[in-house]
Amino acid sequence: MQWDVDSLDWKELGAEAELNQVLNHKHLGNGSIILFHNDAKYTPQVLDSILKGLKEKGFEIVPISELILREDFEMDHEGRQKLKSGAA
C-alpha cells in the first residue's frame, strides 16, 4: 500500500501550510492514505483540525485494514490497489 497525499510535514512550513496541503491536495479522495512523519514539528497541533476538515468534506477515517483489497486486485504504478477489470 502506498500513500497518495503527502502532508509535507517534514518541510516544517507551519501548521497552516500543513493543514492546507492535506485538505486541498489534488489526490485527496476516497481511499486516500495521508503521509505524516513521527517527528513532525507542526502535526501534533494541527492534526485535530485536519481530521475535522476531512470529516467536513465528507470523508470517514478508517483503519488501513478496511482499505485493503484481498481478492481480484492489481497494483498500479503508484502503489494503489485497483479491482481487476471484470471483478465484482
Image (cartoon, rainbow, N blue to C red):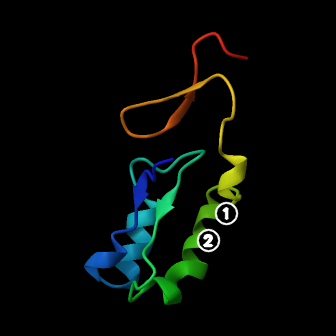
Q: Could you classify mark 1 by the number of other residues whose Cα lies within 10 Å: few (under 14), some (14-19), or many (20 or more)?
A: few
Amino acid at dot 2 = Leu
* 72, above or below 27, in the image: above
Number of numbered callouts drawn: 2
Q: Position of residue 34 (x, y in %)?
A: 49, 61
Q: Position of residue 56 (x, y in %)?
A: 65, 63
Which residue shows up at 42% across the image and 75% down it? 37
Q: Could you classify mark 2 by the number of other residues whose Cα lies within 10 Å: few (under 14), some (14-19), or many (20 or more)?
A: some
Which residue shows up at 39% across the image and 80% down it? 16
**Residue 22 falls left or right of residue 50:** left
Whether label 2 touches label 1, CB < 8 Å? yes
Amino acid at dot 1 = Lys
Q: Position of residue 43 (x, y in %)?
A: 46, 82
SS type, badge 1: helix
SS type, badge 2: helix
Q: Position of residue 84 (x, y in %)?
A: 58, 18
Corner quadrant of residue 47: bottom right
* 73, above or below 86, in the image: below
58 and 64: which is toward the camera: 64
Kindly give the residue lying farthest to the top in the view shown. Answer: 86
Corner quadrant of residue 19: bottom left
Task: Quickly name the residue at label 1.
Answer: 55
Q: Which mark is residue 71?
A: none
How far apart are the alpha carbons under marks 2 and 1? 6 Å
Task: Quickly name the residue at label 2.
Answer: 51
33 and 16: which is toward the camera: 33
**Residue 6 falls left or right of residue 83:** left
